[in-house]
Structure formats: C-alpha cells, structure tokens
Amino acid sequence: MKISQLSAASGVSQPTIKLYLREGLLPPGAKTHANQAAYSEAHVRRLGIIRTLTQVGGLSVASAKTVLDAIDSDLPLNWTFGLAQRAASPDVDGTDLSDADLARADDFLAGLTYHDGPGRFGVAKALRAMADAGLEADGAWRESYRKAAEIIGEADIDLIDRREGRLAKAETVVIGTVLGDALLAALRRAAQEHFSSQRYPSRSTETAP
Amino acid sequence: MKISQLSAASGVSQPTIKLYLREGLLPPGAKTHANQAAYSEAHVRRLGIIRTLTQVGGLSVASAKTVLDAIDSDLPLNWTFGLAQRAASPDVDGTDLSDADLARADDFLAGLTYHDGPGRFGVAKALRAMADAGLEADGAWRESYRKAAEIIGEADIDLIDRREGRLAKAETVVIGTVLGDALLAALRRAAQEHFSSQRYPSRSTETAP
C-alpha cells in the first residue's frame, strides 16, 4: 500500500509516519519508484505499537525507539523486559532513596528475585510516600498487594509464553508493560467501587459523584 | 508551633504553606498575635497528605482541595472514594468511548457492582488500546488480572475498615487511592522481573540493563 493508504489504515497522519520513518521507529517500505515505497500490514501493526507507546504510555520518540530496537533485536526477553520497564517508568530511579527506604522495599519483596530497577525503586518510593503521609500499611494489606502482584506478574509471563515466535513475545512484553499499568489501575478502581458499595451502602451509589 | 517550625517539621517551604492556607487546603492556625498563629501536629499531618496528593499523585492545587474537602466533610465514604478516584484519574472520562468499547469493559467486569467512572472508563480505554496494538489479552490472562484486582480492592476496603474514626478512614481512602497505583505498578515490575528471570534464564540478569 502507499503511504496515504498506510495513513488511512493506521489512523496516523502522513507527517507523523514520515517522522517515524526518519527517526527509524518504522522500517522503510519496499522502494517502488524513486519517490514511492510500498508498505505492508507489518507497517500498520508497527504503527499501532508506536501509538500505544507514545500516546498511552507517554514515551518520548527517543524512548519508543529504544524499546522498538529491543523488540527487533535478539536480546534475551528479560533484557527486553528491563528496557520496557525503564522506558515506561522514566521518573523511577534510585537517586534520592536512602538505605532505609531500600531496606523497606527489600523487606516487602523478600522471596522474589529482582535487581536495582523500577520495581525495587518504585516500591521503595511508594512505601516512603505512604509513611510520609501517615498511612500505616499494615501486614494484612501488604500481604494482599504482594499476592496480587505475584498473580499478575506470573500471568504476564504466561501470556508471553503462549505467544509464538520471538517478535510476538517481545511485542507482548512491551505492550503489556505499558498498557498493563493502566488496565490494573482501572480494574482496582472498579473493584474498590464494588467492595465500597457493598461495605458502605449508606447512600445510593446511583447518584454518587 | 510557629510557621517556621511547621515548615521545618513538614519539609514544606513557608511560601508554599502560605499558599495552602490562602487556598484553604490547610486550616488556619490558632491566632496568638495580630500577625502570628500557632500550628499543631494536625497541620504537619495535613501537609504530608497535601504533599502526597500534589507531588506523588500529580494533583493540581484545585483538585487537591476538592479531595481534602471530601476528607473533612461528612460525605459517605463511597462518595469520598468516587471523588478521590476522579481526582487521581483526571484524563479518564468516557467522552471518546464507543458502545463497543464500553461493552468490552462490562464483559470484563461482569459480576462487580460499578457505575460510570474511572474504573469502567479506564478498563474500556486500556482494553481498546490493547486491541489497537494487536495484543490479544486471552481469557487466562484476563482472569488473573480480574482476580488480582478483586484481592486488592477488597484489601483496600479492609484497610479502611481497620482505621478508627471517619477522618482516619477518609484519609486512608484518599492516600490509598493515590499511592496504591504507584505501589502496585512497582510491585508488578518486581514480580515480572522475578518470574521472567525464572522463565528466561538465558543470560545472567546480574548484568541486564
């Protein structure tokens, strides 16, 4: 298909497609004339992934390129995971974390295998913020969050296992990392609403704000 | 304590404290002289909550005020929940969702009690983005996410139940809504890292990026 048809099929404007081609996020089409190239369904699919990364995940074009390069590479999948997690958590680093902050996270995560990265640092930051805000997250609550995270983490890896071929697996790593956060946050809200309306039926939720 | 001491105890600068006083996020101190007021531990605590909302949750001062007003009111807790969820998800509304998008969310959420809001809309948006990106989220994966969300949603309500008095409960609703997302996203990353390194030990994760 021509670039105009690729634009129509993907919902991405031609100038944006040209930017992605120039920056190397989208591979070039097959040359048909001096100034024309033919694009395929693979280009439509890749544009869908780029849109997810930039529009839903909020990644910069440069970060998206790093992640797409990891998809196309032959890096081990756990490296691709690491790159995707870092790209999707640009503000989570360890620079302002104290040893006590990290120890709190390590205590929470005991029994899991992990290294320095968005997981450990993010848990440390969240737990510190809770302590700062005076919210005691007690053992029962922590245990539930931990259990839920294990169910989800394992489900993510199982989903990847069920995909055939390295490309599909790596795409799933990246898309799942970026979109899973949004899905999970929304599911949590719906579940809170459910249990809250069961537990606190003091006024009809029909008219709740 | 004086405002200088309140600033030292809370880590919030005096100009910012004055802004919060002016905008009504922080209640006034007890007047001691014409130009002086005495602040209490309750002010320190409230500043911790304001900092969580604005710095971690990314809420605007106006949104933070709405949520703080809900904490101080005698609204039913499920209303406070609704307000906190909306404030913490400013970009999640239903305006660009089709009936098919909403039906997909309702299918996922079947069996839960919920209404229009960040939960339903956010699930619809995330599932649509997954479909657009060509990621088939199969039944087993969905089932795990759903189960994990129910564990978490119920744990959140249980935590609130264990807090004494309406103020502490409402504070927990608000802080938990804002900080729980960040904690959960980080826990998910750590759990992915754990299961990924177990499943794909193709290269040492010690040196993974």
Image (tube, coloured by chain):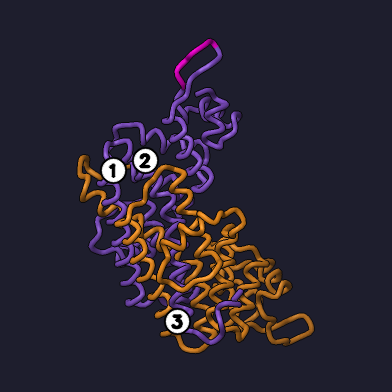
Chain colours: A purple, B orange
Q: Secondary structure at mark 3?
A: helix
**Where is residue B30, by image quadrant?**
bottom right
Where does the image place residue B100, in percent across and percent down from the top left? 51, 54
Is the residue marked by circle 1 packed among few (<14), some (14-19), or many (20+) residues within 10 Å?
some
- Part of the protein shown in magenta: A29-34
Is the residue marked by circle 3 packed among few (<14), some (14-19), or many (20+) residues within 10 Å?
few
Where does the image place residue A190, in percent across and percent down from the top left? 46, 68
Tell me the residue at 65%/72% (across/down).
B65
Q: Which mark is residue A198?
A: 3
For the residues labelled 1 and 2, say whether their Cβ atoms are less than 8 Å apart. yes
Q: Secondary structure at mark 1?
A: loop
**Amino acid type of the residue tagged 1 in the rendering:** Arg
**Amino acid type of the residue tagged 3 in the rendering:** Gln
- Asked if residue A33 lies in the magenta stretch, the reply is yes
Q: CA distance from mark 1 to mark 2?
A: 10 Å
Instruction: Say if residue B41 shows up in the picture.
Output: no
Q: Secondary structure at mark 2?
A: helix
